[in-house]
Image: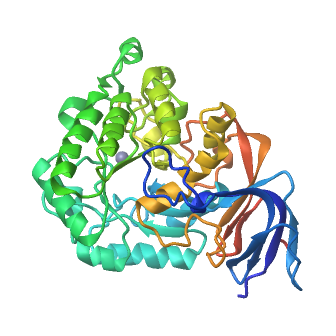
Amino acid sequence: MPTMDYLIRSSRVIDVSGGDVSGASGPGANAASAPLDAEVDVLVQGGRIAEVGKGLAAPKGVREIDGRGNIVLPGLVDLHVHLREPGQEYKEDIESGSRAAAAGGITTMCCMPNTRPVNDCRAVTDLIVRRSREVGIARVLPIGAVSKGLEGKSLAEFGEMKEAGIVAVSDDGRPIMDAGLMRRALEYGKTFGLPVVQHAEDLNLAEGGVMNEGAVATRAGLRGQPPQAESIMVARDIELVEWTGAQYHVAHASTARSMELVRDAKKRGLPVSCEVAPHHFTLTDEACASYNTDMKVAPPLRNESDRQALLQALADGTVDCIATDHAPHSEVEKDVEFDCASCGMLGLETALSLSLELVNDGVIDLRRMAYLLTQGPARLFSLDAGIGTLAVGSPADLVMFNPETRWVVDRNAVQSRSKNTPYHGRKVPGQVLLTLFGGNPVFDRKGLCDE
Ligand SMILES: [Zn+2]
């Protein structure tokens, strides 16, 4: 099917791939050139970015789209999603997850290996890559398991999974508790050019806690787990990074102390990075007081001082990217007592709006937001050069949204197969109007691309 060509007129276009807005200690950005942030036109031809500039001439047969009042960013990049395929398609599959991504402006996502079977070998990686290409709604880049079966005992086959297309390794959902195994994972990761992503949680300290330890947990009568369960793991891992020199990434970092540790490691020049999930910078443990199981997540929602530390770290460059940890669960896992409910929240369809709240609250500016959602993540996992940018010749992955429109999150109106959003009823800014993936409209709220 031939792709249509599009000319998006007069949007505010932000592409930070040419500039350094990574923050004081962010990964290697090119300070010599400037980021693009201007009201310009974007020409999409043959599925690629053909031209970006003011007053572009419209080639014959191109569809012109009035972009005034809207913002255009490169398609967003999410390093942390759970697509549940293979094995738990009743919660989500690659197609429904890709539709949710498109509705949220996300065109590239990295999917965690805790599927059934686990993605710990070439066959499963192949299956995910093949299936996502068939679906063709978003770019899905698998993350391979660190250990076979996520059992934390012996290393999975990094080399063959890398050949099949993984971009990182992780046992996410479970921490790598064994320091010896973590050392070897870092060493092999370095050999194969694969960052090791840690779900930092000392299970002995966490002791089955179902929410953050503190006054709210005590009042609610729920078992808490301390923030140190996370930071002690981060501290141990940073020691191993210093030893091995391997690239290490903290998934869904959620505590003030984790931020201090990552900030300090970066100052010392260590290849340490971290992501923060929108739910950790927008919600606190107070949300668990109502026993709403959609608020149950790992790591748990923290207290206000932890949240404030995340905001600071998002602004000062300690945080490298915003990642959703999109984790769909059905009523079977969520319509139960808080103690018994599975951990996890939807994230793909709300990440952009919640990030815009940061901008509206003056925590970060739009360019920094664009970095955290596009170039930051793309650089961390060394994704292909055309991802997270609107540079001429890149695949035409982009999102156009209206920053002024406010909308109410509705769990019954999501694209995801599951409904476990913690934001049901919340009014949020920024409505996605159009998402192009490889030049194809994969989400088109108002039929702007219709024939
Ligand atoms: Zn995790």
Q: Residue 381 falls in which quadrant of the image?
A: bottom left
Q: Residue 333 falls in which quadrant of the image?
A: top left
Q: Position of residue 317 (x, y in %)?
A: 47, 42
Q: Is residue 451 visible?
A: no
How many marks do you count on the picture?
Answer: 0
Query: Which residue occupies the foreground of this view, 356 or 114?
Result: 356
Q: Is residue 40 left or right of residue 36?
A: right
**Quadrant placement of the N terminus:** bottom right
- In this view, which residue lies farthest toward the left? 180
Residue depicted at 57% across the width and 68% down the height: 138
**Quadrant placement of the C terminus:** bottom right
Q: Position of residue 53 (x, y in %)?
A: 79, 68
Against 402, residue 54 (above or below) is below
Q: Is residue 139 left or right of residue 194?
A: right
Residue depicted at 27% across the width and 48% down the height: 174
Residue depicted at 33% across the width and 21% down the height: 213
Q: Position of residue 306 (x, y in %)?
A: 42, 26
Against 189, residue 133 (above or below) is below
- In this view, which residue lies farthest toward the front? 32
Against 384, residue 250 (above or below) is above
Query: Which residue occupies the foreground of this view, 314 or 215?
Result: 314
The image's colouring method is: rainbow
Q: Position of residue 357 (x, y in %)?
A: 65, 36
Residue depicted at 56% across the width and 52% down the height: 371
Q: Is residue 362 visible?
A: yes
Query: Which residue occupies the foreground of this view, 259 or 33?
Result: 33
